[in-house]
Amino acid sequence: MRKIAVIAGLLAMLLVAGCASDGAQKVIVEVNGDKITQQEYDNRIKLISSSYKIQQRSSGSTQEVTIDDSILPQIKETAYNQLIMMKLIDQEAKARGIQLSDADKDKQLADFKAMQESNGGASAYDQVLKDFEITEPELKQELAVGLLRSRVENNIAEENQVTEEQAQQFYQSNQDTYKEPAGMKISHILVDTEEKAQDIIKQLQGGTDFAELARQKSSCPSSSRGGDLGVVNQDTPMVAEFLNAALSLSVGQITAQPVKSEFGYHIIKATGQQAERIIPFDEARSEIIETLKSQVVSAYLDQLYQQAEIKDLREK
């Protein structure tokens, strides 16, 4: 339900290429002998600054967002650490023989563009380029960096398969995590305009399947689950407009009008009433395995960072 969720992956890893002066080519850090330049560092700072401004605006700030002395040191440190991790990922990919073809890069860009335009209209892709002040070739390079990281992480996970015993042990040790309170099971479809929402409501009234429309039309990550958000009650941390509308529904009922929130326009459906329960292991198993895989990968990457020979050459 975060309206910039699709861009979140983009923010994590952008490395802008381009011409640079001799001063910009100054090396500010070495990672296992590989160099990172002042130009790369400055571009990363610029990107994170843009990201910060966009997130502030998306959270409802009506004032002009500026980067002041209270936030700039944090941005610089984040930029520094991100660049080091990017370099480590690149080194790890080479060690594992993982490469991207031109076709891989072209498809990644095409998929990203299609997703933006599907969720936000024909101008959404161009707006991303404008918001982050990047060109399409620069975006293509960034998406390639993200794809390379994904393949490295998948390779690490494949080498460290999670066993059934490990999953069971995690489940038993985290029982509180799998307590689900009583409430209403809710699904939703999120779009960016009221017109789109009204059209979806008409399709639903005509008998189109809610879950299928959610998979096709919703910009929320829950779209992959047919819009399923799980169980909602008065204590669920959701924006008031959404929560009040959701809890006013009866089982099987769909909101007759779009519900507007800071995230966009929602069509909400109540799919069932649920009593308090412990989610059974079989139901939680896939999520547990993904959690454990993520922990393995994070630990591996942390170890790469800790063991790397890093020379900080920035001016103090």
Image (cartoon, helix red, strand yellow):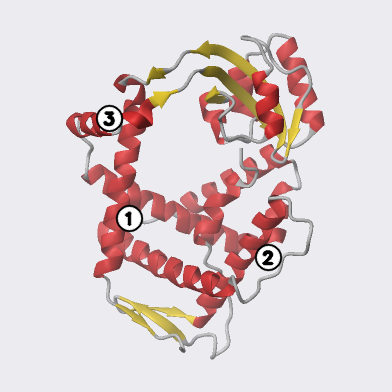
Q: Earlier in the sequence, mark 2 or mark 3?
A: 2
Compared to residue 256, the image places residue 70 above or below, namely below
Please tell me which residue is depicted at 78% across the width and 35% down the height of the picture. Answer: 193
Q: CA distance from mark 2 to mark 3?
A: 45 Å
Q: Which residue is mark 1?
A: 98
Indicate the amino acid at tag 3.
Answer: Tyr
SS of the residue under disc 1: loop
Residue at 27% over, 55% down: 300
Q: Quadrant of the N terminus?
A: top right
On the image, the x and y values in percent for residue 33 come to 31, 79
Residue drawn at point x = 34 percent, y = 82 percent: 311
Whole-percent x, y for residue 7 in the image: 59, 50
Can residue 279 be seen in the rendering of this structure? yes
In front here: 157 or 244? 244
Q: Earlier in the sequence, mark 3 or mark 1?
A: 1
What is the spatial separation of the Cα atoms under label 2 and label 1, in whole angstroms? Answer: 30 Å
Q: Nearer the viewer, residue 132 or 265?
A: 265
The residue to which callout 3 is attached is: 171
Mark 3 lies on a secondary structure that is: helix
Q: Residues within 10 Å of mark 1 (few under 14, many from 20)?
A: some
Q: Using a 10 Å C-alpha cutoff, classify the residue at mark 3 as few (fewer than 14 neighbours), some (14 to 19) or many (20 or more).
A: some
Determine whether 1 is above or below 175 in the image.
Answer: below
> Is label 3 or label 1 in front?
3
Q: Which residue is mark 2?
A: 133
Image height of 127 relative to 178, above or below: below
